[in-house]
Image (cartoon, rainbow, N blue to C red):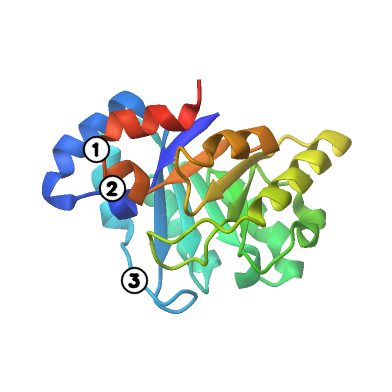
Amino acid sequence: MYTAPSILSLDYTKFAEQVAELNECADWLHFDVMDGHFVPNLTFGPDILKAFCRTSPLFKDVHLMVSDPAFFTPVFAKAGAEGITFHYEAVEEAKQSELIEAIHELGCKAGISIKPGTEPEVLEAVLDKVDLVLVMSVEPGFGGQSFIPSSYDKIRKLAKRRKEKGYSYLIEVDGGVSDQNAAELLKCGCDVLVAGSYVFKGNIKERVASLRQE
């Protein structure tokens, strides 16, 4: 499994210190890019990602919570993204495969995400093409929300489908993840745990280690 602290919750007055800690204990860095339109919040642009690329060797996992992911994909790929995930709800189904191919052509892993109100069955047409499926276990847009329990069943369904069809996508979960639900998430078939508030509101190394449930 992979731990992916969300840098949305990082204390930017302690940027160097906290990035150094993450470099020692985490597997990925998760970047929540919000445009103020697809979700009611604004976060950061490609220059922030470039700063992390200069200070961290960890895998840069970019989650585009934007209305036009096709526009932002090359922008963040050029800035150093290694994985780019877009929302099912933001792209017409007929154009999703095309965007996945474009992400791959830019040298990045391609992911697709679903909101809490979207069922995983809608992803059937692209499950053989993506490298990652991200289940949002809170409503996207803000950190610090409580985990939505129905997310467990979505992860189980995706894990079952992966096994049945021999697919290779990773299953990622984002929202309300902590040591209280990490073990169950991993048991359900999750591969990547994104955690923001939980990691940064305590001892970073201890909090990341607690997610591994080893």
Name which residue lies at 47% across and 41% down: 82
Residue 116, position as x, y percentages in the image? 62, 64
Tell me the number on the disc at residue 50.
Answer: 2
Instruction: Tell me which label, 3 or 1, sits earlier in the chain.
Output: 3
Q: Give left or right: position of 81 versus 56.
A: right
Viewer-nearest residue: 30 or 102: 30
Please give the name of the residue rendered at 32% of the width and 61% of the height, measured from the top-left corner. Answer: 45
Reply above or below: 153 against 160: below
Mark 2 vs mark 1, CA separation in Å: 6 Å
> Quick one: which residue is furthest to the right in this view?
164
Left or right of residue 54: residue 214: right
Check whether the beta carbons of the residues at disc 3 and disc 1 lie within 8 A of each other. Answer: no
Q: How far apart are marks 2 and 3 (CA)?
A: 18 Å
- Outermost residue on the left side: it is 13
Q: What residue type is labelled 2?
A: Lys
Q: Which residue is drawn at 78% across and 37% down?
A: 167
Q: Residue 26: horizontal and vertical position, in percent?
A: 38, 30
Q: Residue 42 carries which label?
A: 3
Q: 10 Å neighbourhood of mark 1: few (<14), some, or many (≥20)?
A: few
Residue 150, numbered circle: none
Q: Is residue 130 above or below residue 179?
A: below
Q: What element carries label 1?
A: helix
Name the residue at 49% across, 67% down. Answer: 71
Kind of residue at disc 3: Leu
Image quarter (top left, top right, bottom left or bottom right) of the N terminus:
top right
| Residue annotated with mark 1 | 54
Give yes or no for contact between labels 2 and 1 (Cβ–Cβ under 8 Å): yes
Is residue 27 visible in the rendered image? The answer is no
Residue type at numbered disc 1:
Arg
- Res 214 visible: yes
Image x and y of residue 40, in percent: 41, 77
